[in-house]
Amino acid sequence: MDQGRVERDKLVELLLQALETEIRGAAVYRAALACTRKDELRDEWQAYLEQTEDHEHILTDLCVEVGVDPTRESAGREAVRHLGRSLVEAIEHVRARGGGELAELVAAECVVIAETKDRLNWEVIGEVRERSRAASVPRSKRRTRRSRRRRTRTSTTRWAGPASSGST
Ligand SMILES: [Fe+2]
């Protein structure tokens, strides 16, 4: 298999897993919202739920943009789905067993687990995007762009997209 094909397959897998992470992340936030007892936390998770739904749309559009069917299945995507469903089940299980502070705590832990995968996905997407931008710049101009990027990195993120928002 040629290197270009390998890279394309990795990108497809990354996008499918990232999209599934957003879909499952939204489900985790919905389940978590049913457990929260504090207004401040409810407002925060509600905002993150809305951002997560936005991310789902962004990734769906991105898949279409690069010619990937957003409904396509893969083993990695299925694994993300299983993990996401497990998180929701864990939250619902504790809620059914009485809810209260324990359910809120379990929900918060599940949110953190979901967010961790989400952030890793966006970091990798940012790196792929950066590599792809660098590859599209003629070699003679790369040094200039690289040094300009170093100067601005302290005030901006590498990927100015959803990763900076703080939600899954
Ligand atoms: Fe997200």
Image: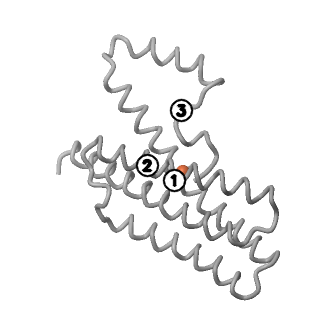
* Mark number displayed over residue 57: 2
Residue at image coords 33%, 51%:
10
Report the residue that reaches farthest toward the left.
Answer: 1
Query: How far across and down, in percent of the image, does residue 147 sit?
Result: 52, 15
Query: How far across and down, in percent of the image, does residue 24 sit?
Result: 50, 64
Report the residue that reaches farthest toward the bottom.
Answer: 97
Q: Amino acid at mark 1?
A: Glu
The answer to whether the residues at label 3 and label 1 have Cβ atoms under 8 Å apart is no
Q: Quadrant of residue 95?
A: bottom right
3D distance between C-alphas at marks 2 and 3: 16 Å
Query: How far across and down, in percent of the image, does residue 65 sit?
Result: 30, 41
- 4 and 17: which is toward the camera: 17
| Eye-nearest disc, 3 or 1 | 1
Q: Badge 3 local density, few (<14 within 10 Å), some, or many (20+)?
A: few
Query: How far across and down, in percent of the image, does residue 20 sit?
Result: 43, 61
Helix, strand or loop under label 2: helix
The answer to whether the residues at label 1 and label 2 have Cβ atoms under 8 Å apart is yes
Q: Is residue 143 above or below residue 108?
A: above
3D distance between C-alphas at marks 1 and 2: 6 Å
Q: Is residue 140 above or below residue 164?
A: above
Q: Amino acid at mark 3?
A: Ala
* Mark number displayed over residue 160: 3
Q: Earlier in the sequence, mark 2 or mark 3?
A: 2
